[in-house]
Amino acid sequence: MSKSKSYCPAPWCNLLISPTGKIYTCYESTSSYSSVDQNLNLMTKNSLLSSIKDLMINNQEVEQCRFCTLKDSFLDNQSLRSEFLSNFPEPIYQLSHEQNIKSLDLSFSNLCNLKCIMCSSEYSSQWSQDKKVTSNAQYIKNNLYPLLSQIERIHIAGGEPFIQHEVVDFLLHLIKTGNTHINLSFNTNGTSYSTKLKDILKMFNNLTITVSIDGVGLHAEKIRPGVSWDRIEENILKIRNTLPHAKLISYTTFSRINILYFDSLFLYLLDNSLFNVSELAFHYLRYPEALSVQTLTFEQKADFKKRHLTLAKLLLSKGYTLSDVTNFSNRLRLISRFMEL
């Protein structure tokens, strides 16, 4: 069967577990279809999941996938759907209802050391009144450890994964079972990078570390009360020096909080040799809606577009390649498009 324009392997091959135990097809999906309270075998036969597959098989748009559709309209082969198609192409799934999990997006718990002003108790224990930690570790151990021999990709987020002992235990299990070849990635706030973790991560051959950076200097410390920007900068350099084989990415989530400083943020990261242009990734905040860039004034949106073009010209004058700057600029255009929705 030919590949439909709406087809994405994620509902067939991927499982995302949120810190609170909700199950999604992927991190771009706008709604969950199950939870860790449900048996894994029943979960993969979930009626909502089946309806998503039916829509894709019949070449119909899927509401949960609208953000990949938006990206695909602006960027060639850079949406999450494109990434899944590249890593898990047909004929593995044959557009049938057969489930064959090969990819995992895991949050072991909401344990976090920060109380970022755009976050919530779902993703940070610091936001809970009693700092309650919700954990999926036992579910992962019981249900997903037996599948590791068939898993090709694992992304670990939080909370803050670099301070969670369950993550260390999981990595040690991967090493013990000979799964160090797996495509392994993390999303960290950059505040913690222990010697023990460094020694463990050295064992993994295909490693990506994404550092969430929504501001630099005093602005970073305002967005994430209690954080030390100097410590984050120090840890970025430590990761580069101790894990030279790892792919290191800066990831910025645009919101009302930082959109007015986006150009100075990126220039700081570039001018201080923390990242290069191809390592700058960014997205837009969807929730809470009050902080979304969609709520900016007309004048602020116009100013973003103007400064976006000025920044692109400046990067070219600094000697960055036309290809890298064009790609960077197109991704900023996506932010502008989202503002207008």
Image: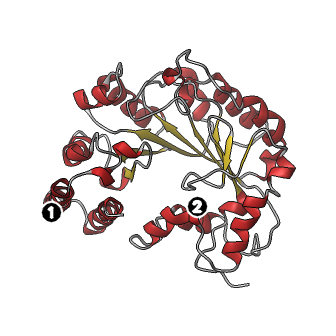
Q: Is residue 267 visible?
A: no
Of callouts 1 and 2, the N-terminal one:
2
Mark nearer the viewer, 1 or 2: 2
Q: Residue at x 57, y 26 (%)?
A: 197
220 above or below 52? above
Describe the element under mark 2 as helix, strand or loop.
helix
Q: Position of residue 72 (x, y in %)?
A: 46, 71
Image quarter (top left, top right, bottom left or bottom right) of the N terminus: bottom right
The disc label shown at residue 313, or none: 1
225 above or below 269? above
Nearer the observer, 290 or 61: 290
- In the rendering, which numbered label is found on residue 286? none
Q: CA distance from mark 1 to mark 2?
A: 36 Å
Which residue is more in the foreground, 101 or 6? Answer: 6
Q: Which of the 4 quarters of the picture holds residue 290?
A: top left
Image point 53% across, 21% down: which residue?
128
From the image, tell me which residue sits under label 2. 64
Graded by Cα atoms within 10 Å as few (under 14), some (14 to 19) or many (20 or more), the crowding at tag 2 reads some
Q: Which amino acid does the dot numbered 2 rest on?
A: Gln
Identify the residue at the far top of this view: 130
Image location of residue 288, percent across then percent down:
42, 42
Q: Nearer the viewer, residue 309 or 131?
A: 131
291 relative to 311 in the view: left or right: right
